[in-house]
Amino acid sequence: MGIAIRLQEVRERIAQAEARAGRIPGSVQLLAVTKTFPAAAAQEAYDAGQRHFGENRLQEALEKIPQLPKDVAWHLIGPLQRNKVRKALEADVALIEAVDSLRTAESISRIAGELGKTADVLLEVNIDGEASKHGFSPADLRIEWEQLAVLPHMEIRGLMCIPAPVDDVQRARPAFAALRQLAEELRARGPLLLPVLSMGMSHDFEVAVEEGSTEVRVGSFIFGTRFYPSHSA
Ligand SMILES: *Cc1c(COP(=O)(O)O)cnc(C)c1O
């Protein structure tokens, strides 16, 4: 179905954006977002060399994980309800990307501690202040940073954002730049290095790379149009 070809095209475009921005080749990781697509589509991407996959909903991830080879790194990119934290940690996902409150972070650290592990996470930031969206406001994140950064069984690897859609991708640039600057500010406060900036999707990943993204989350560009089953909206 052309998945290998489109994957190759995304990789090339990422490389070109890295070059335009004077970044080190290979500094951006491609996450193939397989939500709503069957495990067979993920397998096709795997066969084309893809190893990092993103799923939005835990339940869907849990269905696909056993169907793919063991060396896949699964990233949970959707919001995680606190009553599902234990399940997510037991599934050993590589990265929980959308931690959006101190309370959720505290649950993750506590339950990871009970399970004898450390959870790698990103904090989702509502970078452009869209009222309807998930994520820490930059102001809350600055205030709660000390409490977040010392949670013993949770390692904050960086920040992620999903800016509001814009008709001209150039207008996504300020939001991406703002996330990068916020990460720099928090890094300066220590003690975390925050190497990961997860930003950029099918329509805007090149701009995100130019603005410093280290991980782009690309779904429909690779796998095609998503159709949502009517029962799950
Ligand atoms: C669905 C989704 C993506 C991928 O979106 P595309 O526009 O299909 O590339 C990226 N990030 C998150 C959080 C998503 O839910």
Image (spheres, rainbow, N blue to C red):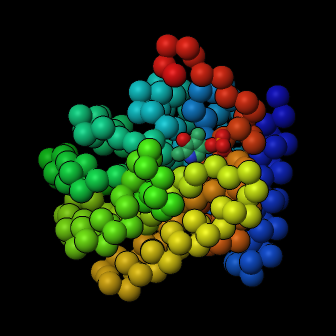
Q: Quarter containing ligand 1?
A: top right
Quarter where residue 76 is shown: top left
Would you place residue 177 above or below residue 233 in this image? below
Q: Is residue 12 left or right of residue 126?
A: right
The single residue placed furthest to the bottom in the displayed view is 188
Q: Residue at x 73, y 30 (%)?
A: 225
Q: Nearer the viewer, residue 146 or 167?
A: 167
Does residue 148 appear to the left or right of 206 in the view shown?
left
Q: Position of residue 211 (x, y in %)?
A: 65, 72
Rendered position, 45 above or below 103: above
Left or right of 31 on screen, residue 119: left
Looking at the rendering, in which quadrant would you find the N terminus?
A: top right
On the picture, is 135 further left or further right than 166?
left
For this orientation, the residue located farthest to the front is 131
- Spot occupied by residue 224 in the image (x, y as percentages of width and height): 75, 32
Q: Residue 143: x percent and y percent? A: 25, 71
Q: Residue 84: x percent and y percent?
A: 28, 34
> What residue is shown at x 57% (from left), y 65% (from top)?
175
User: Between residues 188 and 2, which one lies in front from this camera angle?
Assistant: 188
